[in-house]
């Protein structure tokens, strides 16, 4: 009996370690995730915490801090891990909405920190910045942001919408198709005969309608509970939503066009969606990452989708300013779909 148990045990171990996906997701991926988040939030991160200082400068402590800091240009000063940007309130509000900064200072006789207390990143930045002034002994005033469009919840919800589009489309189309191929259901469709473009388009359309229902439900929920408001036009939101679906649908098709192993398919899908969920600004601004990483992150499909959603929801941005992300999302989706259709296998 001991011999049987030992043989079975080693057999199961070999089955596990021979699967590349197990090695990657169990060992390599946690290391990559830790490395990525460490770049964004590590103590030795090259990225300074961006704080906005409103004009005019009237506080002696802020002026002294600026005089001791390194001058980047006439409005940006860097020191002690912070980057202070001096600007007027209208431009500051735009930066807050885009997640380029989370904390604003009105430098009167007493410092007034303006931010959403629900944003832990802003709370931490405030406390750390006070330490750099004079060991945190200064008096200050905290003013809570309550205007829709500037709160953390307004930053978070478009991120969740973009993530939901990606997750629903990638898993709904890719994994569903791979599972059908594994169960040999796709093989049976050849006898119909089945046009593969019809098959793929039907999958995409069905998933699109599900995504519409999910996004409407999330929007209604956020409106009722958090007073979440649409600052832009419904047309612009619809265009961003459609373009995002096209992009991820094309990616889902090419990813699952030949794979029949669900374990491999699971690994491929996670290799796409998980890194983008971490770095594309769903829960925190991707501006936390070093400049070299940020220059790559901003062109990822999920990043472009979320940035466009936030711009319409929170800023009311015009269609003329959306042409680049919409074009890239649609072109990438169409290109991926054409290639996926070309290499598609029924079995």
Image: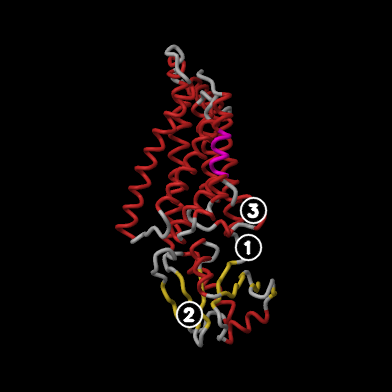
Q: Distance between the residues labelled 3 and 1?
A: 13 Å
Label whose residue precedes the other's in the sequence (3 or 1): 1
Task: Determine which of the numbered discs, if any, sits on residue 295 in the image.
Answer: 3
Q: In this view, does 23 lie to the left or right of 174?
A: right
- Label 2, secondary structure: give it: strand
**Residue at (37% x, 38% y) in the render:** 210
- Asked if residue 331 lies in the magenta stretch, the reply is yes
- In this rendered view, identify the residue nearer to me: 322 or 290: 322
Q: In this view, does 130 lie to the left or right of 194?
A: right
Range covered by the magenta-colored residues:
328-336
Query: In the orientation shown, which residue stands out farthest toward the front?
Result: 320
Query: In the orientation shown, which residue stands out farthest toward the left?
Result: 224
- Label 1, secondary structure: give it: loop
- Label 3, secondary structure: give it: helix
Name the residue tied to disc 2: 112
> Where does the image place residue 9, in percent across and percent down from the top left?
50, 26
Name the residue tied to disc 1: 47
């Amino acid at each position: 009996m001991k011999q049987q148990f030992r043989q079975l045990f080693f057999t199961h171990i070999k089955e596990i370690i021979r699967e590349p996906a197990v090695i990657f997701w169990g060992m390599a991926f946690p290391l990559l995730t830790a490395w990525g988040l460490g770049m964004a939030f590590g103590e030795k991160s090259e990225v300074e915490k961006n704080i906005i200082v409103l004009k005019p400068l009237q506080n002696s402590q802020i002026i002294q801090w600026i005089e001791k800091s390194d001058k980047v240009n006439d409005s940006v000063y860097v020191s002690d891990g912070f980057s202070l940007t001096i600007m007027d309130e209208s431009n500051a509000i735009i930066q807050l909405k885009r997640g380029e900064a989370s904390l604003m200072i009105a430098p009167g006789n007493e410092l007034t920190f303006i931010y959403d207390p629900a944003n832990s990143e802003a709370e931490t930045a405030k406390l750390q910045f006070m330490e750099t002034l004079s060991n945190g002994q200064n008096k200050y005033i905290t003013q809570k942001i309550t205007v829709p469009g500037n709160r953390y919840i307004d930053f978070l919800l478009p991120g969740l919408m973009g993530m939901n589009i990606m997750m629903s489309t990638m898993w709904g189309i890719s994994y569903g198709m791979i599972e059908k191929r594994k169960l040999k259901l796709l093989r049976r469709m050849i006898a119909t005969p089945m046009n593969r473009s019809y098959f793929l388009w039907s999958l995409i359309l069905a998933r699109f309608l599900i995504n519409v229902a999910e996004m409407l439900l999330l929007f209604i929920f956020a409106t009722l509970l958090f007073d979440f408001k649409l600052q832009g036009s419904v047309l612009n939101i619809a265009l961003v939503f459609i373009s995002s679906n096209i992009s991820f649908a094309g990616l889902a098709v090419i990813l699952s066009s030949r794979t029949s192993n669900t374990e491999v398919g699971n690994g491929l899908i996670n290799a796409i969606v998980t890194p983008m969920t971490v770095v594309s600004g769903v829960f925190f601004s991707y501006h936390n990452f070093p400049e070299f990483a940020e220059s790559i992150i901003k062109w990822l499909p999920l990043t472009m989708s979320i940035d466009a959603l936030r711009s319409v929801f929170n800023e009311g941005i015009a269609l003329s300013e959306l042409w680049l992300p919409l074009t890239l999302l649609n072109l990438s989706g169409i290109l991926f779909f054409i290639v996926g259709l070309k290499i598609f296998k029924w079995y």
